[in-house]
Structures are given as structure tokens and as C-alpha cells.
Image (cartoon, grey):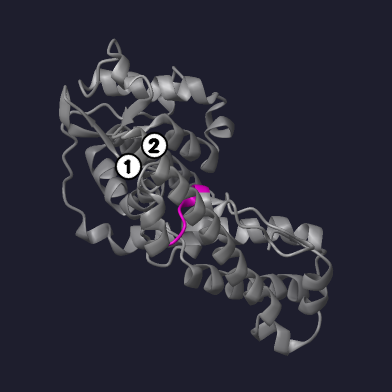
Amino acid sequence: MGNTQNNYNNNSNDGNNHMKQCPDYLLAHTSNEYKRVVMKLTKKNKKSNNNDDNNNNDDNTINSNNSDTSMINGLNLEQVLLLKPPHGVSLSFDHLGMLFNMDEEKNGYFSENNLITFTKNYYKTYCNIVKNDSITTDDALVEMDGHFTLGLWKYVANNDKQNHDENKSITSNDQHVISSSDVNEDSDTTTTTTTTTTKTKNISLLVNWLLSVIKNLGPLQTFKSQPEIEFIHSDCLHSLYKLIDIRSSYNIDFQAFLDVVQRAGEDQGLMHLDETDFDDYCPVIVVENFLTEYFKSIINMMNELDFVG
């Protein structure tokens, strides 16, 4: 897992049996960590509910009513980041490829079974890399990150090929799509309709999954002035900003990114920035359009470099 040392490295060089079976102590740690986080969240939720009862607070806040759902479906993104790896194992779950691989149901939650299966697969892959490629554990960190990143893009690219002949026209309702041209002002956004509709459908699985991950961080919000439009809180958008590393892609800080998203929402008539109710929110459809354009550009680059052939 990530930069794996000591016990993890020793087991990886201990023969073919270890290549096939994840050690029990790693699986036990995974299960115990999941239960620890669930218990912590349960206590926090009970305390929060008691405070809400005392204050009779019906406000639709960003963290309300998502802990109970997590107990049923699994941990959300914010909660899975609370998991601690075993001693001597350096791993962070804030990696898009790892999370996509882990969430077998693609519902935006990460269950105990998901984590156990992921631990087994990660260990087997790590052992193969260290043993077969004869690399150090430090290099294995980069190798494992690359393994899950490439796996994600190959998955999307394979779906891209499978769906190519099935694509139908997808209407855009004349909505403005945020792309690199919004962040970097001088970009040519001209593309053919065929390419756009094809790519939109092919990448929709990844976009819809990532939207589920973000939506699971807190309830959606609607406003009286825009009752049909769903909004997410800026805290959820910030989690997305960090997860897909918008700063590195566009050299833009979060506040500037939020401003771009909200400005696009206003341009589409989805929100009114002069109303204070919208200060900390942005339309889900704008985020969806941005993600579609964002991943299209990555897949195009990967295809040009023949990384996902």
C-alpha cells in the first residue's frame, strides 16, 4: 500500500504463497480500522442528533443526515480518509484510481467488503511489482499509484471502444460547459458534434461515479428561486478540487475555481450571485459538465500518447 516497508516488504519476498494470499494481520487491520471509524462516526452522529433536538434546528447543513446512510452503505470520501494503514505502511486513499477500484458497486461509498477486497488485490499487485520488477519499496509507491491510475483510464477507454457504435445524440440544452478555456482564458473550444456526443457518453460512467462520491459528502440543496436545480455545498466542491488535483491541472486556487463554477452557473441562469443564499453553493449540472470536459481532455491525451491502447 503506497510506500510499503518492513513487514509488508518482507512478506512480498517470502515465496509464491504470499504472492497469492494476503496475510491475515493485514485483513484484520483493515476490518478493525473500518469498525473503528464507524464507531467514531456513530458516537459523533448521536451527539449531533442530541444537539439538534435541543436546538430544534431544521437547517439543511452540509454534514446533516449522511452518517446514518454511511452506516448502511459504507464510508463516504471524507470518512474513508480517516482510515489508518498498518504500521510501516504509508498509504493515502485520496487517489482517484484507488478509490474507483475500491468501490465495486460504483455507488460512491466504500464498504468493509470493498476495503477487504481492495487490501487483497493491493497486496497481490504490490508483491508482483516488487518481486517481478525487482524494484525497491520506495519505487513501489510510484509504481502502485501508476498501476491504479492506468487501470482507471484503461477501464474508461475500454468502455469508450465498446460504446462507440451505440452512441446517440446527447442534447446540451445550450448550457455553457466549464473547460480549460474558462480557467485559462485563451483556448479554442471548437469541437465537432460527433466527437462531443461520443466522448460525453463514454466518460459518463466515471463522471456519474465521481458525482456520487461528492454528493455522498452531504445532502443536496435547492432554493425557492431555483426549485428544480440541485446544488452542492462549496465544501463538497473543495473535496473534488483536492481529489482530482485541480490546482496542478489549471494552476488555480480553490476560491478562483469556485468563482468560475458559480459564474458559469449564473451565465446559464441557474443561480443569482447577488443573492446571499447562493454564496456557498454551486449547481450540480455545472460540476457535471466540467468533469465531462476535464476527463475528455485527459482521455484524449492518453490516447494520443498511446497509454491506453
Task: Identify which amino acid the numbered label 1 is placed on.
Answer: Pro
From this view, report whether residue 155 is shown above or below residue 266.
Answer: below
Q: Residue at x 18, y 44 (%)?
A: 170
Disc 2 and disc 1 in contact, CB within 8 angstroms: yes
Q: Which residue is mark 2?
A: 62
- Element carrying mark 2: loop
Q: Position of residue 80 (x, y in %)?
A: 54, 55
Relative side of 252 to 70, left or right: right
Magenta-tinted stretch: 74-78
Q: Nearer the viewer, residue 264 or 80?
A: 80
Q: Residue at x 41, y 52 (%)?
A: 67
From this view, report whether residue 118 is shown above or below residue 306.
Answer: below
View extreme (front): residue: 54
View extreme (bottom): residue: 17
Quadrant of the image occupied by residue 272? top left
Q: Which residue is mark 1?
A: 219
Q: Position of residue 141 (x, y in %)?
A: 72, 57
Q: Nearer the viewer, residue 40 or 176?
A: 40
CA neighbours of label 1 inside 10 A, class few (<14), some (14 to 19), many (20+): many
Q: Position of residue 82 (x, y in %)?
A: 59, 52
